[in-house]
Image (tube, helix red, strand yellow):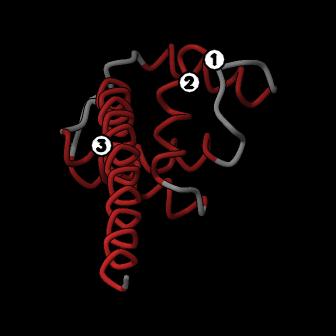
Amino acid sequence: MPHHEELVEKIEELQEEIAQLRQALVSHAVVDQAIGVVLALGGLRPDQGWEVLKTVSQRTNTKLRDVAQHVVRWPELRSLPPEIRPALRIALAEARAAHGGRSLIRQEQRCKAYGRARSGKSE
């Protein structure tokens, strides 16, 4: 019977690995979408978009996939969590300064959105 127990254990391990791979696929898709939002917002290259998300994740102590979900839902919800908003703004500014980039959002639109965010209104 030890062989049966080993098989059961192996099946459980494989089922857990499948679940993790499925979650990774979903997370990967959300991260890719968030990179697209960051690229459009900051006028950056894809590798820079990844770095921006990673920086926000590290600075806010938030899982990268959670940061990505917030960024992807931002246009729909018209707001970001208060800890993510300033970290994203700073990371975008740093990426543009370090590597160059041109925001696809006009300066006056950013100023209006920033003013609404500072006053507590939706972004």
Q: Would you say the residues marked 1 and 2 are in contact, meaning their CB atoms lie under 8 Å apart?
A: yes
Q: Quadrant of the C terminus?
A: top right
Q: Quadrant of residue 36?
A: top left
* Residue ID at (36%, 40%): 31
Q: Residue at x 44, y 50 (%)?
A: 91
Identified by mark 2, the residue type is: Trp
Please name the amino acid that badge 3 sits on. Answer: Gly
Q: Assess disc 3: are there few (<14), some (14-19) or many (≥20) residues with their C-alpha within 10 Å of its C-alpha.
A: many
Distance of mark 2 from mark 3, alpha carbons? 16 Å
Q: Depth check: 14 or 83 in front?
A: 14
Q: Which residue is mark 3?
A: 49
Task: Find residue 78 and name its label.
Answer: 1
Residue at the bottom extreme? Answer: 2
Position of the N terminus by quadrant = bottom left
Q: Secondary structure at mark 3?
A: helix
State how far apart marks 1 and 2 are (Cα): 5 Å
Q: Position of residue 95 (x, y in %)?
A: 32, 50
Describe the element under mark 2 as helix, strand or loop: helix
- Write down the quadrant of residue 42 in the picture: top left
- In the rendered image, residue 27, in percent from the top left (x then y), is placed at 39, 42
Secondary structure state at the residue bearing disc 1 = loop
Distance between the alpha carbons at the discs numbered 1 and 3: 20 Å
Is disc 1 surrounded by few (<14), some (14 to 19) or many (20+) residues within 10 Å? few
Q: Please indicate whether residue 110 sits to the left or right of residue 26 in the image.
A: right
Q: Position of residue 97 (x, y in %)?
A: 31, 50
* Disc 2 target residue: 74
Q: Tag 1: residue type? A: Arg
Count numbered badges in the picture. 3
